[in-house]
């Protein structure tokens, strides 16, 4: 996963931070909720604009993958590793898109595919994908995750 992060231009050792008004992650009753992540590389939002109006589907898919990797880096930062992740429960994907852009599921598939790859066979999850007018900092995509946690030996340690 370090290679994937590096391939996307992310520093896997970079600390992911939240503003003081909310938590980056919240662990409660065996679940971990990860706040929305936008496609940042360092402090720069790497993919800005509207998918379907200036950005194509593949650029949106790259943005979604960046968001997933940032979310997983936040999970690793909270837990120390991914070893306690038992299952991906939920993925919500928000796409800043043109009014006539309808390939939302195809864009979100890139995030789902990455989760499947990291957490095989337990990367399966429920998902909602929504087209929106605006996202923070003009980002093209934002997503959040909900994960089930267990004992360290039950999960995934590579990332």
Image (cartoon, rainbow, N blue to C red):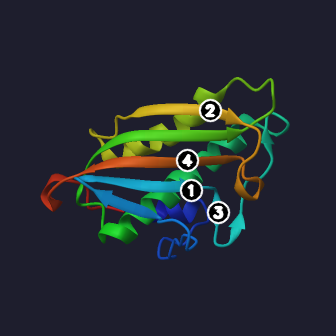
| Residue in the image at 66% along x and 46% along y | 141
- Local crowd at mark 4 within 10 Å, few (<14), some, or many (≥20)? many
Q: Is residue 50 left or right of residue 75?
A: right
Q: Gap in Å between the C-alphas at discs 2 and 3?
A: 20 Å
Assess whether mark 3 and mark 1 are in contact (beta carbons under 8 angstroms).
yes
Residue 1 visible here: no
Which numbered disc flags the more N-terminal residue, 2 or 3? 3
**What secondary structure is marked by label 4?**
strand
Q: In this view, does 16 lie above or below 132?
A: below
Q: Which of marks 4 and 1 is nearer the N terminus?
A: 1
Q: Mark 1 points at which residue?
A: 37
| Residue at the image point whose x is 51% and y is 40% from the top | 92
Q: Is mark 2 on a helix, strand or loop?
A: strand
Q: Is residue 25 above or below residue 135?
A: below
Pointer 4 and pointer 1: residues touching (CB < 8 Å)? yes
Q: Of circles 4 and 3, which is in front?
A: 4
Is 54 positioned to the left or the right of 36 in the image? right
Residue 65: x and y in percent read 56, 49
Which of disc 2 and disc 4 is earlier in sequence? 2
Query: Relative to 80, does residue 110 appear above or below in the rendering?
Result: above
| Residue 8 spot, x, y in % from top left | 59, 59
Q: How many numbered circles does the render carry? A: 4
Which of the labelled discs sits on residue 130, or is there none?
2
Residue 23, x across and y down, in percent: 47, 66
C-alpha distance separating marks 4 and 1 = 5 Å
**Element type at marker 1?**
strand
Residue position for label 3:
40
Q: How far apart are marks 4 and 3 (CA)?
A: 12 Å
Residue under circle 4? 143
């Amino acid at each position: 996963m370090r290679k994937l992060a590096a391939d996307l231009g992310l520093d896997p050792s970079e600390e992911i931070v939240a503003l003081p008004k909310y938590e980056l992650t919240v662990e409660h009753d065996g679940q971990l909720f990860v706040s929305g992540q936008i496609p940042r590389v360092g402090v720069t939002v790497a993919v800005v604009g509207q998918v379907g109006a200036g950005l194509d589907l593949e650029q949106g898919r790259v943005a979604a993958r960046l968001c997933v990797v940032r979310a997983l880096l936040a999970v690793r930062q909270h837990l120390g590793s991914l070893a306690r992740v038992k299952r991906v429960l939920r993925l919500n994907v928000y796409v800043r898109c043109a009014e006539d852009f309808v390939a939302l599921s195809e864009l979100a598939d890139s995030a789902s595919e990455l989760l499947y790859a990291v957490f095989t066979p337990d990367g399966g999850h429920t998902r909602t994908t929504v087209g929106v007018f605006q996202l923070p900092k003009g980002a093209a995509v934002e997503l959040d995750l909900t994960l089930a946690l267990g004992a360290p030996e039950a999960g995934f340690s590579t990332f």
